[in-house]
Amino acid sequence: MVQVYHGDGFRVHIWLNDHEPAHVHVYRAEGMAVVEITSLHVRAAYDMKPPDLRRAVEIVSQNQPWFLHQWRQIHGK
């Protein structure tokens, strides 16, 4: 797992050997969400409060080019 963002109490990771579509795992306290990088679709959310989930999607939106670049570097695509 590679951490690609840390700030505002959020951590964003890309897992090694993960599957498509390109996505990140966003953590906040005990909560976690899986957000697709290009569509911003929330594939899963666990124990994340609605305001934190909105902020998680915002973080992915604001960092889309960087996260997609990192995904491609990690997965060789």
Image (spheres, rainbow, N blue to C red):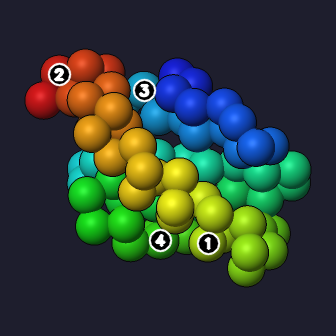
Decide if residue 8 is in sight here.
yes
SS at circle 1: helix
SS at circle 4: strand
Residue at the (66%, 31%) spot, across then down: 6
Q: CA distance from mark 1 to mark 4?
A: 10 Å
Residue 19: x, y in percent? Answer: 31, 45
Residue with the mark numbered 3: 16
Residue 21: x, y in percent? Answer: 25, 54
Q: Earlier in the sequence, mark 1 or mark 2?
A: 1
**Residue 7 versus residue 42: which sits nearer the camera?**
7
Residue with the mark numbered 1: 54
Q: Is residue 65 above or below residue 25?
A: above
**Residue extending furthest toward the bottom:** 50
Left or right, 8 with respect to 24, comes to right
Point out which mark residue 42 bears.
4
Left or right, 53 with respect to 43, comes to right
Residue with the mark numbered 2: 76
User: Which of label 1 and label 3 is nearer to you?
Assistant: 1
SS at circle 3: loop
Q: CA distance from mark 3 to mark 4?
A: 20 Å
Q: Amino acid at mark 2?
A: Gly
CB contact under 8 Å: marks 1 and 2? no
Q: CA distance from mark 4 to mark 2?
A: 24 Å
Q: Is residue 62 above or below residue 2?
A: below
* On-image quarter of the C terminus: top left
Q: Amino acid at mark 3?
A: Leu
